[in-house]
Amino acid sequence: MVSGIADVEMSVIALASCLAELERYNGQDWQPTFVVHDSWTDSPCGFCIVYEYDKFDGVLGFRATVPDWAGAFGNGRADDPIGFGRDLAFLEIAEPLGTTVRHLRADRHNVQWRGDLGPALPCRPA
């Protein structure tokens, strides 16, 4: 675990990092514009973000699982939820959907989900 934050779930740290990075990118220069409607953690290593994106007509949901191995995107940082969240914001959420749009799964609220999904789609804990 990351030094000094061993008692905090990886998902909480990664989610906070991802949201901060989205806020930083939001609408600057050539960056897309986002409206984050909701976010939550659903496990010690999993989190969800529900958002709108100016390059997609509708509401999107993204579920991520923080890996417990080094270098999620080749950054070489072992157990780095901050770097993982930052990378996810830029490499997954801010990027155009491309062919991913064919694999979106709609929930009962018509949120179009993608990411690390199981058979049941994510829903906010009560």
Image (spheres, rainbow, N blue to C red):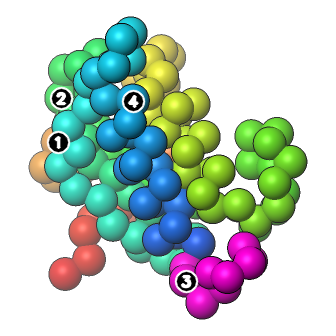
User: Residue at the bottom extreme?
Assistant: 7
Q: What SS does tag 3 mark?
A: loop
Task: Indicate left or right for 77 with 31 as reference.
Answer: right
User: Where is the N terminus found, in terms of image quarters?
Assistant: bottom right
**Neighbours of disc 3 within 10 Å: few (<14), some (14-19), many (20+):** few
Pointer 4: what residue?
A: 25
Pointer 1: what residue?
A: 110
Nearer the observer, 98 or 3: 3
Q: How far apart are labels 2 and 4 at the CA level?
A: 20 Å
First along the sequence among labels 1 and 3 = 3
Pointer 3: what residue?
A: 8
Q: Residue at x 23, y 19 (%)?
A: 54
First along the sequence among labels 1 and 4 = 4
Mark 3: amino acid: Val
Mark 4: amino acid: Tyr
User: Where is the C terminus found, in terms of image quarters?
Assistant: bottom left
Q: How far apart are labels 1 and 4 at the CA level?
A: 26 Å
Mark 2: amino acid: Gly
Q: How far apart are labels 2 and 1 at the CA level?
A: 8 Å
Of labels 1 and 3, the one closer to you: 3
